[in-house]
Image: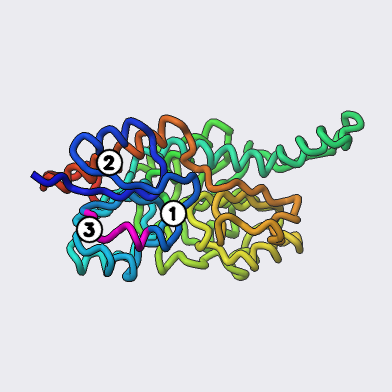
Amino acid sequence: MTRPSVYITRKINEEALKLLSATCDITSWPGPDPVPRSELLKNIPGKDALFCMLTDKIDKEVLEKADKLKVISTMSVGYDHLEIPEIKKRQIKIGYTPDILTDATAELTVALLLATSRRLLEANAEARTGGWKAWAPFWMCGPGLGGATVGIVGFGRIGQEVAKRLKPFNTRQILYHSRSAKKEAEEIGARKVTLDELLTQSDFVVVCCALTPETKGMFNEGAFKKMKKSAVFVNTSRGAVVDQDALVRALQSGEIWGAGLDVMTPEPLPLDDPLFGLKNCVILPHIGSACIETRNQMAVLTANNILEALRGGKMPAELIL
């Protein structure tokens, strides 16, 4: 009996690879960087399954080459890199990795918030380059969480976990904005408000929403103008929810106090991008889920999604839209 064939777009962990290799023929891109578009197009014909990453654009061009494809399993919770209408038209199943990365991303969000507000990277650079002369009463000061209002945009799994982690910092209140009220909010102690209310009242604005046509570019010039001049803006969702030029202007002009970004557009951010020239902006290279255990579990789930789909069984995490 012919073994199904799987194409993997990046080097993955041994556990996930062994799972797939036991029953499938594997072809993969061996490099640490994203698979070149030409390689993906060359290798996808004849494959039964695709194990991909959020860096791989799976669009009509790829799908037209994928003459045997039965399942696409992405090692991510986001799926804006997948051209969903084209995939559904071809009745190809989609697997993804929700839940697993929730804790890791929430932890990173809090870490980024603190690194931004307490100026940790800036202070570290001063200590390393001779800027640290002596203790000074107001040097390297930043806004604290105690008594502050935190606004979370997008109150799904990650947003809720961020809220839980911030409560012990003695925040005054936690506000959230989402399409619908969340029953978990009462237990957490968060209050649903309009986006305008959240922007005008919050000392910290934390973005945890998914990228959709409705959220694309929602943090624009108008949104930043509504925020407090002392506000800290943190984004660990997707870069495209932010109008980056507007953010640069807001940071340069002092319209907001600072920003911490784990996601941006494009990725990686060019070294000459103006965001890198701003001391009040902390930039991380999209490491929200970069916890060893988390990434291993994500890869295993991605593999199991493929195996179950190929068997005709119930996928552990099928994306149904």
Distance between mark 1 and mark 2 Cα atoms: 18 Å
In the rendered view, how is the structure colored? rainbow
- Is 61 situated above or below 138? below
**Label whose residue precedes the other's in the sequence (1 or 2):** 1
Return the residue nearer the eye: 206 or 299: 299
As drawn, is 285 to the left or to the right of 96?
right
Q: Which residues are magenta?
A: 40-47
Q: Residue visible at 59% across and 51% down?
A: 261
Pair 1/2: label in front: 1
Return the residue nearer the eye: 186 or 306: 306
Circle 3: residue type: Gly
**Residue 63, horizontal then vertical, whole percent:** 28, 66
Residue holding disc 1: 35
**Element marked by disc 2:** helix
Residue 46 image label: 3
Return the residue nearer the eye: 58 or 183: 58
Residue holding disc 2: 303
**Label whose residue precedes the other's in the sequence (3 or 1):** 1
